[in-house]
Amino acid sequence: MIRTSSARRLRAALGTAVAAAALAACGGAPAHQGAAAVVGSDRISVAQVEARVAAVREGAAQSGAATEEQPGLARHAVSDLILGRVVARALADRSLTVSQSEVDRARSADAQTVGSEAKLAELLRAKQGVPAADVDGFYRQQIGLVKLADGQDPSSADGDAAIRKALVDAGTALHIEVNPRYGTWNTTEIGLEGSTENWLPASGQAAR
């Protein structure tokens, strides 16, 4: 049997927990503690975001570039991690896949164009904020976007519309929640609101 004083404490604790949950729901906070975002049943942890940011900074340091970047690097990482899952869902909804051989071919072709795998990795880090370990993921996402164009030129109006519809449908189905510190996910615009566009220093700034 629970004593009266213990019961009161229990009710008070439960009331606090319920109130906290309600506040979290009103504030749009992810349902999982320590999450940067929740995409469907998939949780993107703050630790994952911090690890990606650290990898980008480490790559910049190794290349001799300045380690100080403009505000928005963490938001960019969150946005890209969310987008990767949205693209994957859109592909799955259409029974489309991206094979490792497709990734390898695209990556190899670009490496030849720029001169080497190392130069390609550095360009992706500097221009796209992609850590070296995530280069395959970048190509998987890009190839997936092309496939979502449904056979049309992705750069055409019709191709762009097909891609956007696929991503909006997938994002809506996933019920994306984002930790307020990183902004909010705009399903129709397919991106984080409040993210900084120039999130890394320009080459001239990096040289100074």
Image: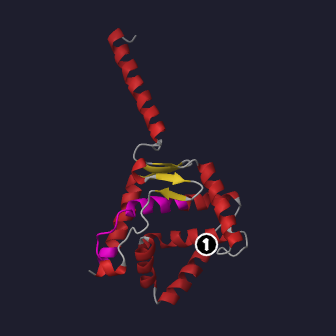
Q: Which sits in the foreground, 134 or 39?
A: 39
Q: Which amino acid does label 1 sit on?
A: Ile
- Towards the viewer: 103 or 202: 202
Query: At which x and y percent is residue 73?
Result: 38, 64
Magenta residues, dominant SS class:
helix
Query: What range is drawn magenta here?
Result: 60-83
The quadrant in which the N terminus is found is: top left
Residue 69 spot, x, y in % from top left: 32, 69
Residue 80, magenta (yes or no):
yes
Give above or below for 57 relative to 81: below
Q: Quadrant of residue 125?
A: bottom left
Q: Residue at x 52, y 89 (%)?
A: 113
**Total numbered labels:** 1
Task: Tell me the SS state at disc 1.
Answer: helix
Would residue 100 be counted in the magenta stretch? no
Image point (53%, 84%), residue name: 110
Image coordinates for residue 28, horizontal then vertical, percent: 47, 42
Q: Which of 201 and 2 is in front in this view?
A: 201
In screen coordinates, is 58 left or right of 49?
A: left
Does the image show residue 175?
yes
**Residue located at (72% from left, 73% from top):** 152
Q: x and y percent of residue 9 in the render? A: 34, 18
What residue is disc 1 on?
143
The C terminus: image quadrant: bottom left
